[in-house]
Image: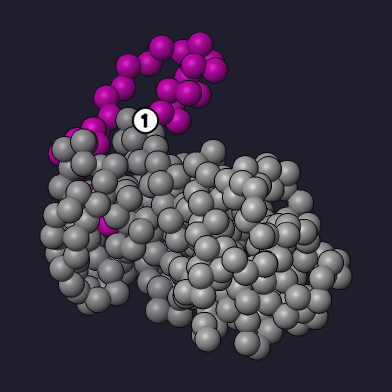
Amino acid sequence: MQNLVLSLPSDPGLKDALVDALGEGSNVEIVDWDLDSPAPRDHIDIVVPPYWGGVKPFTRLADISTQLVQWQSIGYNGMERYLPEGRVVANATTVHEASTAELALALMLAAQRGLPKFITDGLEHKWDLVSYPSLADRKVLLIGYGGVGKAIEARLAGFETTVTRVARSARDEVNQAGETVHVHGFNELHDLLAEAEIAVIGLPLTDETRGIIGAAELAAMPDGALMVNVGRGPIMQTEALIAELESGRLRAAVDVTEKEPLPADDPLWDAPNVLITPHVGGDSSAMLPRMVALIKRQIGHLQAGTTPENIVLGEWK
């Protein structure tokens, strides 16, 4: 079995869980490296950067040789600007889908059933009976049908919604329930939004998806519709969203924003009918065991001489 050197960020929980998962005789040496200082080795087979460390520290990878950089997030926009030539990056597909889908569902339920109002009323000891729309019977449009979109659809299965799917290209695809479903293409997005009572963005950020939800797309949605974003902030044009919120026509629940952290004086905070969470979709207790499982599989691929999973940048040779 091939000997490997693996670097982990200074997160004792991740290291302890991985050591337990690998067991004895794994032939893996684990070193600590947050990419904020010189590398502890000239060669590191698998580099796992910090989850919240950003991509600028990737320039330090130029100082070492490495086989694989295992990113801890699904999104990797902007990374190529700082990634030295020849490096191979895998994203964290299979790690965050469950948690992100959970939050998407929570945001839908909270917005639909008026939980922000009732929480505020509770703090004021105020009993105010108000009827809100259900999630049941709503027409839900999933914008993006990768792992996150499929996971959201699976969690909606028990809520008696009508789900429509749209992604970059039209196709038929098998969902998590094993059913073959139709996915519409982006060329139909405007018409699909016109029928959507709830739209959920689960797209990655690319040149094609940046700003894809703007004034025209939001204007196409029915009065009272809810826009949820658990993808990336720049996919939706904030000024256009704020205009719709301030008009009282649309509602929103967003886990991601164009500027992150969202500045305290950003007008989105003060817009009506918006629920904001601070980009925590994938950051829950579900992350650790799935990240450990992915790293363990990647170790297995390298030791077996097979291609790692989830390669998104670079070419495996």
Callout 1, which amino acid?
Answer: Gly
Q: Nearer the viewer, residue 182 or 11?
A: 11
x and y percentages locating residue 267 in the rendered image: 57, 53
Residue at position x 21%, y 36% from top? 159
Q: Quadrant of residue 40?
A: bottom right
Residue at position x 32%, y 49% from top? 152
Q: Is residue 180 visible?
A: yes
Q: Is residue 188 left or right of residue 293?
A: left
Q: Nearer the viewer, residue 197 or 157?
A: 157
x and y percentages locating residue 220 in the rendered image: 24, 63
Characterize the local packing of mark 1: few (<14), some (14-19) or many (20 or more) Cα atoms within 10 angstroms. some
Residue at position x 23%, y 33% from top? 134
Q: Quadrant of residue 166?
A: bottom left
Q: Is residue 54 left or right of residue 152?
A: right
x and y percentages locating residue 168 in the rendered image: 29, 74
Residue at position x 36%, y 58% from top? 147
x and y percentages locating residue 58 in the rendered image: 71, 73
Q: Nearer the viewer, residue 10 or 4?
A: 4
Q: Quadrant of residue 200?
A: bottom left
Q: Is residue 277 visible?
A: no
Q: Which residues are magenta?
A: 115-142
Dividing the image into 4 quarters, which one contains the N terminus? bottom right
Q: Is residue 67 above or below residue 28?
A: below
- Residue tagged 1: 114
Q: Is residue 280 left or right of residue 213?
A: right
